[in-house]
Image (spheres, coloured by chain):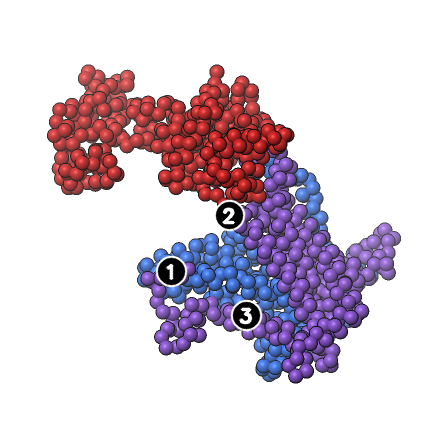
Amino acid sequence: MARPDALDRPWAWGTGRRGAVSRSLTGLGPASVFFLYMGLVLVAPAAYLVWSSVSGEGSRLTLERYSRVLTDPFYLRGFQNSLALSLLTAVEATLAGTLLAATFAYGARLPFRRSLLTLTNVAANLGGVSLAFAFVALLGTNGMVTIILRESAGISLYPRFSLVSLAGLNLVYLYFLSPFAFLVVLPAFRGVRRQWIEAALTLGATRRQFWWHIGLPVLWPSILAVFILTFANAFGTYSTAMALTVGRVNLIPLQIGFLFGEAAFDTELADALSVLMIVVTTGCVLAYRGLSRRTARWLR
Amino acid sequence: MGYIEIERLEKRFGPVVAVRDFDLEVARDELVALLGPSGCGKSTTLRMIAGLDLPDGGRIRLDGQDVTHTPPHRRRVGMVFQEYALFPNMTVAENIQFGPMIAGTPAPERARRVAELAELTALPETLHRYPHQLSGGQRQRVALARALAIRPRVLLLDEPLSALDAPIRQALRAEIRRIQQQVRIATIYVTHDQEEALALADRVVVMEAGRICEVGMPAEIYHRPRSAFTAAFIGSNNLLEGVVVSGQPPTVRCGGQLLRCVSLDGAADGARVMVVIPAESVQLGAAGAGAANRVTGVITLKTFHGPLTRIELAADGQRWLALLPSPVAAACAVGETVSLGIPAEACRVIGRA
Amino acid sequence: MRGLRLAPVLGGALWAGFVVYSTLPLVATTLFSLSRRWVDTALPEGFSVESYRAMVQEAPFLPSLGRSTALAGGTLVIVATLCILLLTWVHIRAPRLGPPAEVISLIPFALPWVVVALSLVRFYGVLYPRILNTPLLLLLAHGAVSIPFMYWALDNNLRAINARLLYEAGATLGARWDQTLRYALLPNLGPGLATGGMLVFANSFGEYALSRLIVGAGWATLPVWQASLINRDARVTSAITVVGIAVAVTASLAITVWASRLRGEVAPAAGRQG
């Protein structure tokens, strides 16, 4: 693509006798800082981690750590919990986020739209520890709602329900996953052009028929993409779960955290667990990207 | 009675009045152009006819039926949008048969209609392609075919060609006219391009600031505009302000100039009027020797437009415009003093509109 | 617009529910932090600011607050610098770099932050062990994982001002790349930088996973200290949480105000917990 640019001047790093590296960096210019940084902080370490998870004695490759992890009922349970929790919360959050976005984009006069957007940002950005405690204050053994239910309605939440459980986590995850899904899916709704709706109306369709024949078919890839991304987000969450349960619930990110600083034999398991997580989350991001690009192409 | 009857249509957006006092009748196979600058209310009017905006006053009747408050999906109007508005998730064929499908038309009939309309709109083998794979001109044809597939009572086009390149615009313009005449459907065509309006329409409605300025056949509007706005908007006209000096022969004083006109349009002595002189009737030098009106001026600008050359002159503090065949215009140069000849028949008086 | 509205009642109810669900925990926390005693009554039995006084008097309070602020500020500087250098270059001179840059900006989504922590410890444990357990490593990590928060905001901003066009105009007028950047682009990048910046700051301030796993209690940031208290001293924890809420609210307010000047998505960055 690089058109011979008559206005081009050699970038400050210079061309000439500096060699191939310098010249390719010239093409990257200042952007090279970014790539270098990300390479050193994210890419190289992650690659090293993958390699280290399969490297055995004297530079042999081994899958021994993986087999240890995948045959250990404890970690299998962890995966089961993580996947189930992430799946469930992703479904819930995507549903909520999509409905909220649909209403927001097309709803009748929603009052205080700006404030609502602020609220969604707050809920999405609160931070794991603060969020965890806020829910303790709400639904913990002496939480506000717990007390209200007990004193005014005689319903005692505990011990049947506990915040420190998968169900409790579900509730808490929903708090930040719903606005996340909402914010990610909202632009897709804005992409449904008003003229399509008008055209459909003049052609005899009702609103509902429009959404059924055109609106949803155009939107579902975006909604699916958001679901996948939300799933990855939930799957990788550490802060909220850790702050809330301190490990009393078996989730893979937490287990990896616990393996930090253990004896060498066990820390190696962390590598395998991590790579398995990477596989899941990277797969999700790739799927997300694929779906988004497909939609973008259609809407050209 | 017209097929489309619009009576005293009015639309306000807050304090702004977008359309007012709009009265129009369109016959069954007539193509009427709504012509005017941006913001004159032509698109708003069209949208009210389609039912996409609710009027604040007035009535709209289609084939005798009052549709002013009928929702758009029950009006059976075919609308073609400026940006095509094709459904991106459907092929060309699916787009075209969308309306009939909604109406419950059985599949074989739908297929037949798709084929018929694809042929009518000269769509080559694109039926299985998606909109993003088509060119602008092709997309517009699909939009047209789709609108016609529901057998609408009326066809509405909202600046359908403005998003297209010039050569395609010309070709498609002729196509649209051909199709409209073949289908014989009452059509309203909104545009800001006067050339388009003059070329396509049976009648032209010139709009300004929400109101109808003038209605007439293209030739009338062009040669005998009745208002200053129309004269300024359409064609290249010289517009001069003046005072009537005498009725016999009809003479108007414009600045320092006495102009003999063809008629006074009923204006009395002393009345303030506008004189409209088409640029193409201004003659230069010897060619204008026998003309009733003679003006001397200096050429300030020459612009070459292919077969014609546009010449601007300064005479007596007035700016004059002449449109000459290029070979003739080649003879004179910027800065030259020349004499202009304007025949009396070319000078028309219109009231100060 | 007519014909466009979904059942407005349902939509309104949905949003009302969301508002209640979102504000309730915040309300409960704030009330708790202001309560004197609250065991079996629906509302606190008495109000006092004792929790805040206790929080401020705790030895780790000021240091951890300072650390979190410094960390968030440092992260902001790193992220802004990286993104400006990258995105202006991409928009102006190297559109071909767009796709790879975008891919890299998605990496923090593809890597759970626990894994980032582990990989950094492994990698630099071998390469440069002296950086382990230092705030510097944490800062670098924050810089990397916070990239998506600013990337999209800045990218949209550059697209909205048609950066390439401005560069070409500047070039024909004799300006170098960096001059165009300084005079024609940066002044117009306010909305993107502000919106993205707020997200970066808020996120870095409240971040826990990396802070705990890379430096832990040795250099305790506010969330790390907060977490250590969560089961030990509910009152102080509540006060700290209110501080955290305040930061999130301020940042979000700023975001929505500035984002209205920026058409386009600010997500998909918001909402990452790590």
Residue holding disc 3? A38
Which three-letter amino acid code belongs to the residue tagged 3? Met
Shown colour of chain B: red
Residue B61 at x, y percent in the picture: 53, 21
Residue holding disc 1? A3
Nearer to the camera, B341 or B309: B309
Q: CA distance from mark 1 to mark 2?
A: 25 Å
Residue contact between numbered discs 3 and 2, judged by CB atoms under 8 Å: no
Which three-letter amino acid code belongs to the residue tagged 2? Arg
Residue C159 at x, y percent in the picture: 47, 55
Q: Tell me if A39 is positioned left or right of B280 in this view.
A: right
Which three-letter amino acid code belongs to the residue tagged 1? Arg
Residue holding disc 2? A300
User: Is C248 rendered above or below residue C5?
Assistant: below
Look at the image and tell me whether residue B98 can be seen. yes
- For label 1, the SS is loop
Q: Chain of mark 3?
A: A
Q: CA distance from mark 1 to mark 3?
A: 28 Å
Q: Residues within 10 Å of mark 2 (few under 14, many from 20)?
A: few
Residue B159 at x, y percent in the picture: 44, 35
Q: Residues within 10 Å of mark 3 (few under 14, many from 20)?
A: many
What residue is shown at x 38% (from left), y 69% (from top)? A11
Residue C39 at x, y percent in the picture: 82, 61
Could you say which quadrant of the image residue C240 lies in?
A: bottom right
What residue is shown at x 36% (from left), y 23% (from top)? B217
Q: Tell me if B250 is positioned left or right of B168 in this view.
A: left
Q: Which chain is blue?
A: C
